[in-house]
Image (cartoon, rainbow, N blue to C red):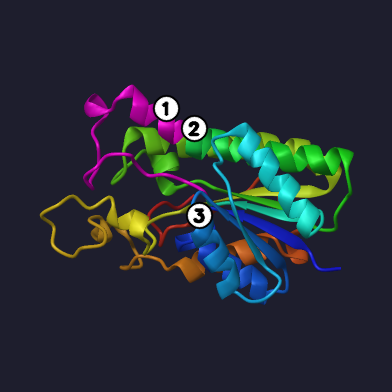
Amino acid sequence: MTRIALITGGASGLGLATARRLAEDGLTVAIADLRADAAREGAAGIGPGHIGLQVDVAQEASVQALFEAVETRLGPIAVLACFAGLLSTAPRPGRLPLVELGVDEWDRLMAVNGRGTFLCVRELLRRRATGARVAHGRIVTVASLAGQVGGQQSGAAYSASKGAVLSLSKVAAREAAPLGITVNTISPGPIDTPMLAQTVAEGNGDQKYLGLSQVPLGRIGTPDEIATAVSYLVSPGAGFVTGATLDINGGMSMR
């Protein structure tokens, strides 16, 4: 039986690259995004049988409606990848210093990155605990190097929200284990996406990342490299890996 994968934030960037890879792996994919048209376009672009739906991951009712729609149309969700995220609400690119950080910015990033991940993970675990069991249940959350070492190019709200994802994922891994579901986290460093470009303040030309000298491999990563990591974590072969954080950062942080 084909496994069903739900990817939030799947209409662009890392989420879309992962959707493509999981479709190539044989999964049926539901792309969910705040932008409904982009979600449907992304799903159509990866082939027939996949669907695109709208969701606001920060809203409990929206998340519940999303899961209900996916399972009604496709069947029980076996794989969840939480890519929906926000770097900043600031109108200009560049790192916002802590002393300039407002409560609205803090709350919005916590709502999308932290609460959004919590709501999606909780909904999947509730459904698998009370509904149909699935083979090879997998959850992949998305943190960041910024959440591990403190924002070098990103601000305090983003870093703190991604730190929350790291802690939440370990708790979820323990509680999901009796259901046969693994929970792992990917922690990207600089990856070539529009979000990375938001970290570069005006006046720096066409640079994609200002900290390239700190990357031992001497380059930024690609979305396909993230997708490959997720492909492994959700595969049947990764069934004994849970509660782990996979660093994909070119060597910027080694543990």
Residue identifier under label 3: 247
Point 57% across, 34% down: residue: 59
Amino acid type assigned to the residue bearing label 3 in the image: Asp
Tell me if mark 2 has few (under 14), some (14-19) or many (20+) residues whose alpha carbon lies within 10 angstroms of its own.
some
Instruction: Write the residue at 54% across / 36% down.
Output: 58
Query: Residue 86 magenta-drawn?
Result: yes
Q: In x, y percent, where is residue 93?
A: 23, 48
| Count of marks placed on residues | 3
Residue 161 appears in view: yes
Residue 187 placement (x, y as % from top left) = 50, 51
In the depicted view, which residue is nearer to us: 217 or 45? 45
Label 1 with label 2: CB-CB less than 8 Å: yes
Q: Is label 1 in a helix, a strand or a loop?
A: helix
Q: Is residue 254 above or below residue 161?
A: below
| Residue in view at x 69 percent, y 74 percent | 25
Left or right of 102, for residue 106: right
Vertical position of residue 122 compared to residue 210: above or below:
above
Pointer 1: what residue? 107
